[in-house]
Image (tube, coloured by chain):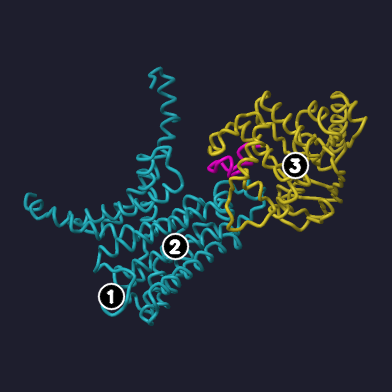
């Protein structure tokens, strides 16, 4: 035991934090995409597991083909937009439950991603040979670029969801009957929301691939869970810090902060020399606990066992 | 204003739950008509309103509003002509959005939604004035989430939303049934005032016969998917609850004797 603690170097942990922040910013942007579907449209969209990899695949292959990295990233955005629209249409036009529509898209994207990557499971793009937007080799720069991009994305989303179309998407997610009575085409709004969400996720995937220096067909596995973790961590923290003053802009900011915190915890776990393969389990447990808390809180207020205690005169 | 010709609707056709909800119903509303609709459970009142709103397509017949044939249009495309208030106060508003945002959504009913602002400062002033008329103090809570309002407040807000952009037709589906008597009266009075001031054409379902007589210039009674009684003008003004009950029993009694005939 003593030997274990002796082997941990606190300075080493501090040294690893910047990389955690850079990755957290990228995954925080990804989580903004999840926030759109999960919180605003009230749909748990599993396509993101596929579109995150798609974004990486498109970006890396286009950069290898000599494209400007920004143009490649824009194409990744479009690819995600398209994939999200497919999920949306499977759901609205063909009546497939949203969660299943997402699973189908994600499943199909595995093949599509391999096709994009010339049937290889991963494709490297070296920062030595190509100009990249950011790279894990120069972490401070990656934090700057990632931070600015996240800020711009938050502002764009904040403005977009204040527009007529954005309001219509929010109304659709909140109350479909009301939305229809106000003349809103709810099917269209769901497709637009899913497309936008997956476009953002694919863009984050493109950034993550550049950061790590390669695109991997499995890089998106579990994105939905990490995205949810970031959204939930951000919400809990945001509500604790801001209370009732937490407005929409604040919520978006805290989603990205949630992503950063997730990666800092991840860094800590690695530093503690815990096998990183266990991280998926920890993440799932954390997400399950936080999703359960609001439900259990409600249960505590009105539960049968409590009614039974009251009836026996035991009070609270 | 509204012209319904021979519409029929059967739910779950060909199954054990088959239900003929509307049978060859025809109804014409003139400009400015305020019609109250009464009838027992399963008479087809809500089905009639849903058919007009376009919740689902009718099996046969046609519906036109303001001279426009809407039979083939889904609800969200008819919405530019129709304002609706539902029975459940939760249905008509978006709980997680602010009062002004809800009103702004209603203000854009039937218009193309683009990338312009969802709510502008100029509209907020207009909404404040309209909310003041409701006398519920909502004008000072414009940025509150609608989910924080009471059922009566939400229903009053829904009524305002339905009439913010003068609809060709206002559909009220027992919109005061879920409220306590005092609030119900407030909302009903607001309804009457708005219909009167804006000269709206309206259909209002109610389970309260006294309300049905006291409001509007015309009354229809439905039974088993048919309109069995249609009265307007002086005749309606002089109508008594006892007369309505008689009509009601007449219709139900006939059914009773039919059942007896089948048994014997």
Task: Point out residue A316 in the picture as x, y percentages from the top left corner.
Answer: 38, 22
Q: Which residue is the site of mark 2? A: A200
- Say which residue appears at 65% left-offset and 41% top-offset: B126
Q: Which residue is the site of mark 3? A: B171
Judge whether A146 appears above or below B45 on screen: below
Binning the other alpha carbons within 10 Å of mark 1 as few (below 14), some (14 to 19) or many (20 upward) gives some
Q: Nearer the viewer, residue B201 or B43?
A: B201
In the figure, residue A314 lies in which quadrant? top left
Judge whether A192 appears above or below B22 on screen: below
Task: Point out residue A161 in the picture as x, y percentages from the top left corner.
Answer: 52, 53
Mark pair 2, 3: CA separation: 41 Å
Circles 2, 3 touching at the beta carbon (< 8 Å): no
Task: Point out residue A286 in the picture as x, y percentages from the top left corner.
Answer: 33, 48
Q: Nearer the viewer, mark 3 or mark 1?
A: 1
Q: Nearer the viewer, mark 2 or mark 3?
A: 2
Element type at mark 3 = strand
Q: Which mark is residue B17?
A: none
Task: Point out residue A69 in the picture as x, y percentages from the top left corner.
Answer: 38, 74
| Chain A shade | cyan
Judge whether B21 appears above or below A301 on screen: below
Q: Considering the image in quadrants, where does the C terminus of chain B appear?
A: top right
Q: Which mark is residue A127?
A: 1
| Chain B shade | yellow
Q: Which chain does the numbered disc 3 sit on?
A: B
Any magenta on residue B90? Answer: yes
């Amino acid at each position: 035991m003593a030997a274990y603690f002796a082997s941990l170097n606190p300075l080493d942990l501090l040294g690893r934090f910047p990389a955690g922040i850079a990755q957290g910013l990228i995954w925080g942007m990804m989580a903004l995409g999840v926030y759109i579907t999960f919180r605003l449209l009230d749909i748990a969209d599993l396509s993101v597991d596929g579109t995150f990899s798609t974004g990486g695949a498109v970006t890396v292959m286009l950069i290898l083909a000599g494209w400007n990295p920004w143009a490649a990233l824009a194409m990744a955005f479009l690819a995600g937009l398209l994939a999200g629209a497919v999920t949306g249409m499977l759901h609205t036009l063909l009546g497939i439950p949203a969660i299943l529509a997402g699973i189908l898209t994600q499943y199909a994207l595995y093949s599509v991603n391999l096709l994009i990557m010339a049937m290889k499971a991963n494709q490297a793009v070296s920062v030595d040979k190509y100009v990249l937007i950011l790279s894990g080799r120069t972490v401070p720069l990656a934090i700057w670029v990632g931070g600015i991009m996240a800020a711009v994305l938050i502002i764009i989303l904040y403005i977009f969801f204040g527009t007529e179309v954005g309001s219509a998407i929010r109304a659709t997610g909140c109350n479909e009957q009301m939305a229809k009575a106000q003349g809103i085409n709810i099917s269209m709004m769901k497709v637009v929301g899913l497309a936008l969400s997956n476009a953002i996720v694919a863009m984050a995937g493109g950034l993550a691939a550049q950061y790590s220096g390669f695109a991997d067909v499995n890089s998106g596995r579990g994105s939905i869970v990490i995205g949810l973790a970031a959204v939930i961590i951000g919400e809990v923290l945001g509500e604790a810090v801001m209370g009732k003053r937490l407005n929409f802009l604040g919520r978006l900011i805290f989603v990205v902060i949630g992503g950063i915190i997730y990666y800092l915890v991840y860094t800590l776990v690695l530093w503690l020399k815990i096998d990183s393969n266990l991280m998926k389990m920890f993440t799932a447990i954390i997400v399950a606990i936080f999703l359960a808390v609001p439900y259990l809180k409600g249960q505590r207020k009105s539960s049968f066992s409590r009614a039974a205690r009251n009836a026996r005169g035991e009070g609270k | 204003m509204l012209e319904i010709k021979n519409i029929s609707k059967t739910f779950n056709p060909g199954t054990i739950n088959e239900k003929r909800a509307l049978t060859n119903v025809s109804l014409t509303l003139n400009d400015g008509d305020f019609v109250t609709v009464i009838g027992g459970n399963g008479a087809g009142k809500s089905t009639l309103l849903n058919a007009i709103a376009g919740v689902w397509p009718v099996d046969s017949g046609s519906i036109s509003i303001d001279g426009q044939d809407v039979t083939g249009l889904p609800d969200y495309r008819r919405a530019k002509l129709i304002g609706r208030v539902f029975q459940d106060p939760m249905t008509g508003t978006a709980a997680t959005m602010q009062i002004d945002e809800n009103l702004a959504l209603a203000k854009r009913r039937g218009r193309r939604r683009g990338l312009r602002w969802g709510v502008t400062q100029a509209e907020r002033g207009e909404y404040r004035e309209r909310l003041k008329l409701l006398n519920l103090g909502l004008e000072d809570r414009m940025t509150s989430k609608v989910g924080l309002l009471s059922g009566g407040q939400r229903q009053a807000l829904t009524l305002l939303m339905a009439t913010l952009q003068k609809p060709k037709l206002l559909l009220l589906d027992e919109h005061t049934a879920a409220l306590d008597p005092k609030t119900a009266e407030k909302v009903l009075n607001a309804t009457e005032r708005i219909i009167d001031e804006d000269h709206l054409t309206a259909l209002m379902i109610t389970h309260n016969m006294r309300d049905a007589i006291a409001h509007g210039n015309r009354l229809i009674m439905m039974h088993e998917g048919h309109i069995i009684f249609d009265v307007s003008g002086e005749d309606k003004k002089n109508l008594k609850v006892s007369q309505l009950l008689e009509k009601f029993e007449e219709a139900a009694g006939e059914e009773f004797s039919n059942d007896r005939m089948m048994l014997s």
